Image (cartoon, helix red, strand yellow):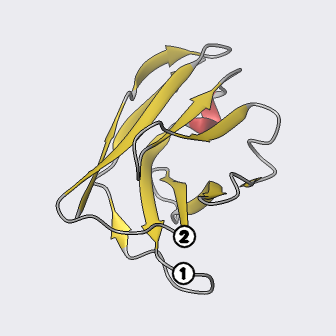
Amino acid sequence: VQLVESGGGLVQAGGSLRLSCGSSGRDFNTYAMAWFRQAPGKEREFVAHIIWDFGSATYADSVKGRFTISRGNAKNTMTLQMNRLKPEDTAVYYCAAKLGVGEEYVYWGQGTQVTVSS
């Protein structure tokens, strides 16, 4: 299984970007999909996740009210709409998937760079 992110790029502060995540390889039943990010010199941090069957979402406080995670129309796809971007949102964004409650995220993408200029 391979997750693939797309949609990153360079944007000015206050702008928007939309990230997408898709999967390839064997089919799997997702319990939850998530976005994480890692800025230079910092540890990877949680951004948002969505529980697949219920569509319920959880966000990090730093992005709440600005970012929206959504399931895609196809199985095991999702998007992250990022509005009112700030320079501190600059990071490599990764999508991930896990198969059951309480389990670790086992499938990861390679990441897509998001750069927000001031």
Picture quarter with the C terminus = top right
Q: Are marks 2 and 1 in contact (CB under 8 Å)?
A: yes
Q: Is residue 59 visible?
A: no
Q: On the rendered structure, is 42 left or right of 66?
A: left
Instruction: Give the labeled residue for mark 2.
Output: 31
Label 2 is placed on what type of residue?
Tyr
Mark 1: few, some, or many residues within 10 Å (few <14, many ≥20)?
few
Q: Nearer the viewer, residue 52 or 79?
A: 52
- Label 1: element kind: loop
Query: Percent from the top left, x then y, of residue 78?
Result: 48, 43
Image quarter for residue 2?
bottom left
Instruction: Give the labeled residue for mark 1.
Output: 100
Residue positioned most to the left: 25
Query: Percent from the top left, x then y, of residue 3?
Result: 29, 54
Query: Percent from the top left, x then y, of residue 1?
Result: 22, 65
Q: Residue at x 27, y 64 (%)?
A: 27
Q: Residue at x 49, y 38 (%)?
A: 72
Label 1 is placed on what type of residue?
Gly
Q: Is residue 58 above or below residue 14?
A: below
Mark 2: few, some, or many residues within 10 Å (few <14, many ≥20)?
some
Q: CA distance from mark 2 to mark 1?
A: 5 Å
